[in-house]
Image (spheres, helix red, strand yellow):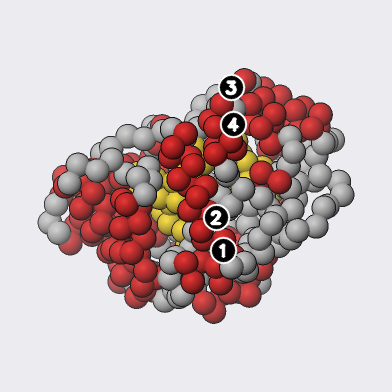
């Protein structure tokens, strides 16, 4: 996750202390010394929508074997013991779980900051108030473009309007809320419209995700943007972030799942001749260290299996019903987990030769394997030129 706001403007938001901390890039098992990773828990595979790019292949069915309320609380206790700073509650649609509010409140009471990733369609006025009362730090609502584009992605007409009402109900309840937007060919030209929407709806935060080819999203690999479109998208994000700042609007803007973005911000500052800005950006992305799946970020699926991240469901390191998360996360007997914790010598192709490897860390392994069959190959979504990366 790249904080465009932090890198460009030196603005500090909640979560930046986990991403940009001295020594974080040298950690093997967490965000910083004495702390575990940020953990995403996909609480359920059940969802009231059927999104084209869903990495969990979620559906409207009830699925057996998902963690019970008691098992979930034991899991949260283990996270607290391992000093996990934040728990991202996701799905499927997490609000389909009847015990969602109970578990969110329990995580908050145990000192594990809960955040919610949702399609937003189930957040009525009462739910918004209950989310806030449960101590949820942030609600990320997925929207992928204007109404016709979003509803086509979500597989349900009216999904856009329902998500909009969910956002508005969060704003009315005083619940911090943000937008989750996955960039692809169908919506890359709508970014300015999305920034207008963020301002108009008083949204606090926006995360622009790069497409990862996993789950149903694997079939969308050919709908990913080109390198030129990625660069154009980043130019728009940079321009509009600066425009918000110039007009005194407090908006946190981030990009996710492509660590080229941090390097691109650095190179942009260099091209603009702003050496002070370039130096600050370099210092921050050096502290971050690039992709940290298997290090400072991990995922637990609905059945309790531990994975490197939410997109990499096919590598499993253990199950929290059998061993604590901390024990699983620090056990390097699994070659994939051990490799992720010290991956630089395993990387191949452009990634291995890149002069920015120390601040990117090979980018996203799942995309590499989806395209090449090799987990350690180059990430095909790298949009930097050979000249820029020193080849």
Residue 51: x %, y % from top left: 62, 65
Farthest bottom residue in view? 222
**Which quadrant of the view contains residue 272?**
bottom left
- Count of numbered marks: 4
Residue shown at 12% from the left, 56% from the top: 273
| Image mark for residue 111 | 3
* 328 is higher (above) or lower (below) than 2: above
Q: Residue at x 47, y 67 (%)?
A: 147
Q: Residue furthest left?
A: 273
Q: Which mark is residue 162?
A: 2
Position of 235 with respect to 72 (left or right) is left
Q: CA distance from mark 3 to mark 1?
A: 37 Å
Name the residue tied to disc 1. 158
Q: Which residue is denoted by mark 4 in the rendering? A: 130
Instruction: Pick the residue in front: 129 or 143.
Output: 129
125 vs 333, left or right, is: left
**Circles 2, 1 touching at the beta carbon (< 8 Å):** yes
Q: Are marks 2 and 4 in contact (CB under 8 Å)?
A: no
Q: Is residue 141 above or below residue 54?
A: above
Q: Is residue 15 left or right of residue 49?
A: left
């Amino acid at each position: 996750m790249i904080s465009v706001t932090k890198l460009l403007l030196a603005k500090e938001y909640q979560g930046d202390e986990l991403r940009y901390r001295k020594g974080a890039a040298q950690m093997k098992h967490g965000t910083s010394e004495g702390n575990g990773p940020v953990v995403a828990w996909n609480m359920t595979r059940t969802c009231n929508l059927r999104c084209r790019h869903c990495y969990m292949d979620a559906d409207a069915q009830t699925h057996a074997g998902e963690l019970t309320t008691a098992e979930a609380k034991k899991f949260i206790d283990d996270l607290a013991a391992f000093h996990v700073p934040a728990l991202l509650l996701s799905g499927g649609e997490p609000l389909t779980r009847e015990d969602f509010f109970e578990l969110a409140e329990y995580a908050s009471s145990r000192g594990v900051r809960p955040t919610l990733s949702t399609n937003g369609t189930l957040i009525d006025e009462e739910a918004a108030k209950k989310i806030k009362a449960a101590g949820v730090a942030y609600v990320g609502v997925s929207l992928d473009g204007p109404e016709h584009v979003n509803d086509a992605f979500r597989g349900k007409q009216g999904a856009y309007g329902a998500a909009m009402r969910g956002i508005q109900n969060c704003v009315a309840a005083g619940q911090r809320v943000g937008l989750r937007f996955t960039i692809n060919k169908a919506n890359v030209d709508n970014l300015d419209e999305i920034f207008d929407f963020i301002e108009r709806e008083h949204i606090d935060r926006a995360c622009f995700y790069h497409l990862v080819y996993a789950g149903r999203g694997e079939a969308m690999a050919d709908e990913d943007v080109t390198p030129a479109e990625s660069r154009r998208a980043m130019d728009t994000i940079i321009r509009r972030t600066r425009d918000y700042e110039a007009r005194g609007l407090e908006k946190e803007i981030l990009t996710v799942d492509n660590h080229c973005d941090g390097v691109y911000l650095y190179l942009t500052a260099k091209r603009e001749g702003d050496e002070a800005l370039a130096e600050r950006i370099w210092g921050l992305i050096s502290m971050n260290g690039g992709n940290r799946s298997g290090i400072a970020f991990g995922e637990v699926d609905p059945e309790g299996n531990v994975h490197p991240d939410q997109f990499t469901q096919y590598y499993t390191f253990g199950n929290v019903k059998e061993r604590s998360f901390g024990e699983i996360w620090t056990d390097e007997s699994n070659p994939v987990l051990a490799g992720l914790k010290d991956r630089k010598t395993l990387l191949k192709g452009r990634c291995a030769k890149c002069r920015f490897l120390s601040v990117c860390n090979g980018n996203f392994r799942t995309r590499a394997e989806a395209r090449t069959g090799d987990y350690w190959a180059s990430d095909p979504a790298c949009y930097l030129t050979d000249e820029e990366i020193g080849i």
